[in-house]
């Protein structure tokens, strides 16, 4: 049974609301129909009793209960008055209808009403319903037995037929009203939900293409305005996630480019001519180091992507990281690289994260330097500062405001490779650890970038 009910329950909101509305209206309609027909039947019953009492009072005027025996006076309309009338003197039957013999059930019911002597009524269910009412003749003292009683009868079939007709008519009217209510409810609910369908389709299209379109503050009902605001927030979050995904892909591509280039160069060099065992081992070591560097890059960036809002725990020695970066990135002997860092200086970030922050800065410095790169690190109130400076052309004043925007380069056709992602990545990683990366604009000649990080 429950399975059938679940299968029959509408799946659409419009169908459910329409069904609930019709069910509620049906309960109200049934209650109204029952109350209406109960009132109609009671009114018809009272009307029948009033007619019986009126006839009984009329017949009572023809009964003489003077000092002598009770007798019935003859009148001009005697045949009309005697129709369905019983007259009793005590328990003695004086007159009865020709259609009701003395031993009939209808006459027996009339006799019981006559015995009571009061103006009671009763219904006899024979071949058809018959209503009988008794009326004492003359004035009767309390507790005394009347000398004569008149009992009149009335066929209730017309009254009950009228009540049944009213019941059928009210049921038909109620059914028609419910059908109209169901149709109107579906139309009204469908019209009310149409904007929801439109907004849903729009949100689906906009989310698929990361569109800038939004529902905004257009004139809508309060509920639809709140729905639009929620959908706008959801679309903004989807767009942010897509941007973050694109940024992560670009950053991974940018950071993995250097170790991949190292691997390619080592393999090309190794394949040019036969190598000794020692040279082969050295090549394998450099390939393994490049592969480990790629793995570290992936782990660092993915970890930051998953949890970029919290400070990354860990500590790292600054000098070993800087020397390792120089050994790895400094492949061109024409540039002199100097590292100035006190022994034992530590920062409150993991070694891999420190490498990823400083690596883009050193890579840019080596790319644009004329002859010299200086890396310095020192304690600073509240943290550690690491500065990477070169003696290259520097950053144009007109481009300084766009340095940390992803994909922006001061001179895209300057002959130096790059996608404009290194500096934004370095700043984002530093800020995720509670630090920052800034451009030292007043330094000349060349360019200088300062990394601030918390102490261990």
Image: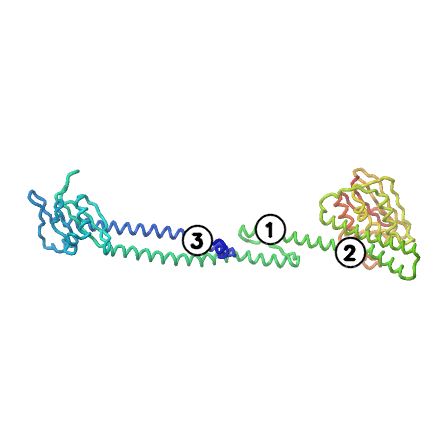
Q: Which residue lies furthest to the front in this view?
A: 103
Q: Position of residue 217 (x, y in %)?
A: 59, 52
Q: Name the residue under label 1.
A: 230
Residue closest to the eye, 129 or 441: 129
Marks 2 and 3 sit apart, C-alpha to C-alpha, by 62 Å
The answer to whether residue 383 is left or right of residue 7 is right
Q: In this view, does 230 lie to the left or right of 41?
A: right
In which image quadrant can residue 163 be found? bottom left
- Residue at label 3? 23
Name the residue located 81 percent from the left edge and 58 percent from the top edge.
Answer: 412
Which percent across, then down, holds residue 407? 76, 55
Q: Locate residue 54, reporting x and y percent.
A: 18, 49
Contact (Cβ within 8 Å) of mark 2 with mark 1:
no
Q: What element carries label 1?
A: helix
Picture quarter with the C terminus = top right
Asked if residue 231 is positioned above or below residue 341 in the image, the reply reads: below
Viewer-nearest of discs 2 and 1: 2
The front one of 7 and 10 is 7
User: Secondary structure beneath disc 3?
Assistant: helix
């Amino acid at each position: 049974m429950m399975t059938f009910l679940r299968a029959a329950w509408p799946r659409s909101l419009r169908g459910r609301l329409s069904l609930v509305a019709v069910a509620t209206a049906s309960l109200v309609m049934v209650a109204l129909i029952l109350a209406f027909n109960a009132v109609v039947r009671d009114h018809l019953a009272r009307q029948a009793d009033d007619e019986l009492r009126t006839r009984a009072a009329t017949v009572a005027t023809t009964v003489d209960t003077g000092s002598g025996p009770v007798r019935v006076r003859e009148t001009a309309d005697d045949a009309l008055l005697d129709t369905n009338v019983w007259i009793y003197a005590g328990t003695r039957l004086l007159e009865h209808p020709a259609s009701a013999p003395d031993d009939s059930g209808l006459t027996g019911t009339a006799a019981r009403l006559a015995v009571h002597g009061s103006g009671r009524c009763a219904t006899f269910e024979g071949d058809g319903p018959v209503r009988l009412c008794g009326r004492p003749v003359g004035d009767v003292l309390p507790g005394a037995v009347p000398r004569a009683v008149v009992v009149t009868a009335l066929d209730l079939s017309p009254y009950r037929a009228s009540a049944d007709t009213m019941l059928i008519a009210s049921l038909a009217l109620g059914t028609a009203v419910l059908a109209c209510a169901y149709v109107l409810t579906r139309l009204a609910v469908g019209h009310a939900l149409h904007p929801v369908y439109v907004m849903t389709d729009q949100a689906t299209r906009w989310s698929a293409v990361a569109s800038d379109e939004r529902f905004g503050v257009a004139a809508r009902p309060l509920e639809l305005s709140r729905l639009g605001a929620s959908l706008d927030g959801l679309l903004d979050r989807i767009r942010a996630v897509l941007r973050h995904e694109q940024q992560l892909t670009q950053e991974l591509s940018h950071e993995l480019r250097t170790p991949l280039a190292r691997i390619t160069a080592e393999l090309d060099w190794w394949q040019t001519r036969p190598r000794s065992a020692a040279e082969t081992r050295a090549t394998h070591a450099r390939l393994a180091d490049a592969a480990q560097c790629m793995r570290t890059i992936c782990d660092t960036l993915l970890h930051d992507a998953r949890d970029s809002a919290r400070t990354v725990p860990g500590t790292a020695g600054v000098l070993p990281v800087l020397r390792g970066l120089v050994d790895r990135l400094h492949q061109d002997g024409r540039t002199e690289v100097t590292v100035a860092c006190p022994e034992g200086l530590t920062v409150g970030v993991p070694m891999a994260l420190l490498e990823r922050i400083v690596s883009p800065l050193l890579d840019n410095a080596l790319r644009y330097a004329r002859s010299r790169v200086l890396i310095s690190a020192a304690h600073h109130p509240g943290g550690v500062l690491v500065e990477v400076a070169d003696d290259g052309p520097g950053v144009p004043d007109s481009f300084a405001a766009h340095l940390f925007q992803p994909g922006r380069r001061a001179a895209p056709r300057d002959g130096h490779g790059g996608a404009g992602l290194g500096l934004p990545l370095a700043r984002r990683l530093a800020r995720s650890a509670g630090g920052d990366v800034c451009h030292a604009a007043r330094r000349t000649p060349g360019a200088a970038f300062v990394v601030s990080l918390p102490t261990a």
